[in-house]
Image (cartoon, rainbow, N blue to C red):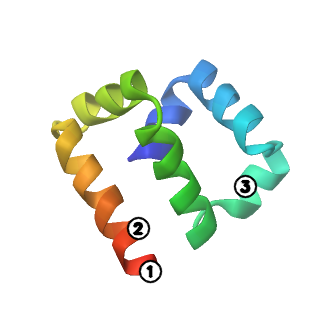
Amino acid sequence: MCLQHLVENPEQLAEFMVQSGLDPVGLRAAIGTPGFSHGLIDYVVSNESLLVAVATANKLSPEAIMRSWAKLHQTEH
């Protein structure tokens, strides 16, 4: 859902690509990998307005996304 939101908002996708250092080819290659998924949700939760936009677009609360993010990071340790 995070990637879908970025795809639907080209300015935000471009900013993500700049921040992550991915070009279009690298982005396509990274999609579906655990590292990409972790980086993408990290990017979304680090930007409050983006977090709220993704949550709203998916009829979720920002807290629900934050709980998923926290659970993801719990399993890493």
Identify the residue at horizontal 27%, vertical 30% (top origin): 57
Return the x and y of residue 68 as percentages of the image width and height: 28, 59
Disc 2, disc 1: CB below 8 Å?
yes
Identify the residue at horizontal 38%, vertical 27% (top origin): 48
Q: Is residue 67 left or right of residue 47?
A: left
Return the mark for residue 73. 2
Identify the residue at horizontal 54%, vertical 50% (top origin): 40
- Residue sitting nearer the eye, 4 or 12: 12
Distance CA(mark 2)–CA(mark 1): 7 Å
Q: Which residue is mark 1?
A: 77
Return the x and y of residue 71 as percentages of the image width and height: 29, 67
Q: Which residue is mark 3?
A: 28
Q: In which image quadrant can residue 36 be found?
A: bottom right
Q: Is label 2 in a helix, a strand or a loop?
A: helix
Q: Is label 1 in a helix, a strand or a loop?
A: loop
* Label 2 vs 3, first from the N-terminus: 3
Frontmost of labels 2 and 3 is 2
Q: Is label 3 in a helix, a strand or a loop?
A: helix
Which amino acid lies under the numbered mark 3 shown in the image of this protein? Answer: Arg
